[in-house]
Image: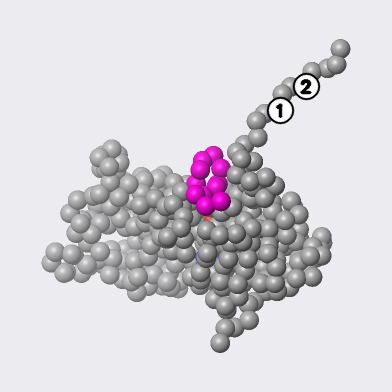
């Protein structure tokens, strides 16, 4: 028997949206815009769509694609989001965005979407509780999950030395020894970047050779702060009082184990985009990231737009996710107003000439 959907807030306190309050059941009407995902991309899309008076419904997720609020809820200090000179805690930044979206009339449903029929109008989504949500346009902002090692100590020390984002957390490892796990281009990039802060970076790779491009390998090999341990996997991460102290490495050839002391561990073994809902309908690249029609956020299906990490495996930052969330809301608004032809950037207006 399906549970009732959890509607955590309806409309805003400062600028209430009458229609949202009149329709507390997300399944009782056809919405103009539904957003899936409550990270920076989804919440920014909600702010823009709500301010355009589209009364968006945001399905914020719970389990399937990561926690409600997205990846930033898993971290502590965010020091690179503009507007916060002293930095801000990840969960607080997300809460601020949510409050802002709510203020302009976004309705939130705290559930996962478990099925999506998007090649029809209206688009139809089913949530875990069995509610059907219908909408004319859809913004997919379901993010991506960093691939995890799934070893003892990883969950407990996540944020206490274990991270998946060197750009975000490298700064906290000044003059420390950190480990990077991986052998591809991103591992080399993360390792090289981390030498700006860390006194020593050890790259641990399970094979005898790296997968990274030659140029990236050469750059890393030339850097005298980077050391390499080949044919090894991390069997366990150790810590004390919530802070990482080292790892136990296992030799993939001999099976021998040894402890390597370190203050941080960065995973660079890839991300998993949350796109399984759209496996048969939306165009994706080989890794499962959604493809959009640049410079817009339009996907291959009419009325469906994508924003944030789910369509970006290059930058993966809160500010870039927020930026594409803004684009997706504007694209959806234009599409609702006039169809696909209205999405493309409007041409610059002719300079006005004075009547003579
Ligand atoms: C440890 C860590 C630290 C970081 N630190 C920083 C930093 O300091 N600065 C920075 O700029 N970036 C940082 N990042 C990166 C940043 O968090 C991401 O780039 C950003 O969160 C991406 O936003 P998003 O909205 O695209 O997706 P996400 O934040 O991944 O959010 C995805 C949302 O979709 C929801 N969802 C997924 N599937 C479903 C479904 N089926 N139904 C309903 N909902 C669903 C999830 O629940 C979630 O709400 C960090 C990332 C990590 C992991």
Mark 2–mark 1 Cα distance, whole angstroms, equals 8 Å
Give the numbered dot on residue 91. Answer: none
Residue 200 visible to an observer of this rendering: no
Find residue 267 and report its horizontal and vertical position in percent: 37, 59
Does residue 327 belong to the magenta stretch? no
Which residue has dot 2 on it?
352
Display coloring = one colour
111 or 131: which is nearer to us?
131
The reply to whether residue 277 is in sight is yes
Q: Which residue is mark 1?
A: 349
Farthest residue, direction left? 254
Q: Residue furthest front?
A: 120
Label 2–label 1 contact, CB within 8 A: yes
Residue 204, image quadrant = bottom left
Which range is magenta?
A: 292-302
Callout 1: few (<14), some (14-19), or many (20+) C-alpha neighbours within 10 Å?
A: few
The reply to whether the residue tagged 1 has its Cβ within 8 angstroms of ligand 1 is no
Identity of the residue drawn at 58% across and 56% down: 139
What secondary structure is the magenta-colored segment mainly?
loop
Q: Residue at x 36, y 46 (%)?
A: 189
* Percent coordinates x, y for residue 33 in the rendering: 65, 58
> Is ligand 1 closer than 8 angstroms to the Cβ of mark 2?
no
Residue 268, given in percent of the width and then of the height, sits at 36, 55
Q: Secondary structure at mark 1?
A: loop
């Amino acid at each position: 028997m399906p549970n009732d959907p959890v509607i955590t807030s309806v409309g805003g306190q400062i600028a209430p949206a009458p229609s949202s309050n009149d329709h507390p059941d997300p399944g009782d009407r056809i919405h103009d815009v539904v957003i899936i995902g409550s990270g920076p991309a989804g919440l920014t899309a909600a702010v823009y769509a709500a301010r355009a008076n589209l009364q968006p419904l945001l399905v914020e997720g719970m389990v399937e694609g990561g926690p409600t609020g997205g990846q930033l809820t898993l971290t502590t200090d965010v020091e690179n989001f503009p507007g916060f000179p002293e930095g801000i805690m990840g969960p607080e930044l997300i809460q601020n965005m949510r409050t802002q979206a709510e203020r302009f009339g976004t309705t939130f449903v705290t559930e996962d979407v478990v099925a999506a029929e998007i090649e029809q109008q209206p688009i139809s989504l089913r949530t875990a509780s069995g509610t059907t949500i219908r909408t004319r346009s859809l913004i997919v902002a379901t993010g991506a999950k960093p691939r995890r090692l799934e070893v003892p100590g990883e969950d407990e020390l996540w944020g206490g030395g274990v991270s998946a984002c060197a750009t975000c957390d490298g700064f906290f490892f000044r003059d420390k020894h950190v480990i990077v796990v991986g052998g591809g281009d991103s591992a080399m990039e993360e390792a090289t970047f981390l030498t700006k802060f860390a006194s020593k970076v050890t790259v641990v790779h399970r094979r005898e050779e790296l997968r990274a491009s030659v140029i990236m390998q050469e750059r890393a090999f030339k850097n005298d702060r980077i050391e390499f341990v080949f044919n090894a996997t991390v069997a366990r991460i150790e810590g004390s009082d919530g802070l990482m102290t080292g790892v136990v490495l296992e030799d993939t050839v001999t099976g021998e184990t040894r402890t390597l002391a370190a203050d941080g561990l960065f995973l660079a073994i890839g991300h998993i985009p949350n796109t399984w809902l759209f496996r048969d309908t939306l165009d994706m690249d080989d890794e499962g990231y959604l493809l959009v029609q640049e410079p817009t956020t339009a996907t291959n299906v009419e009325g469906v737009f994508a924003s944030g990490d789910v369509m970006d495996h290059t930058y993966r930052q809160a500010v870039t996710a927020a930026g594409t969330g803004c684009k997706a809301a504007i694209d959806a608004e234009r599409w609702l107003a006039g169809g696909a032809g209205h999405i493309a950037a409007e041409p610059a207006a002719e300079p006005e000439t004075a009547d003579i």
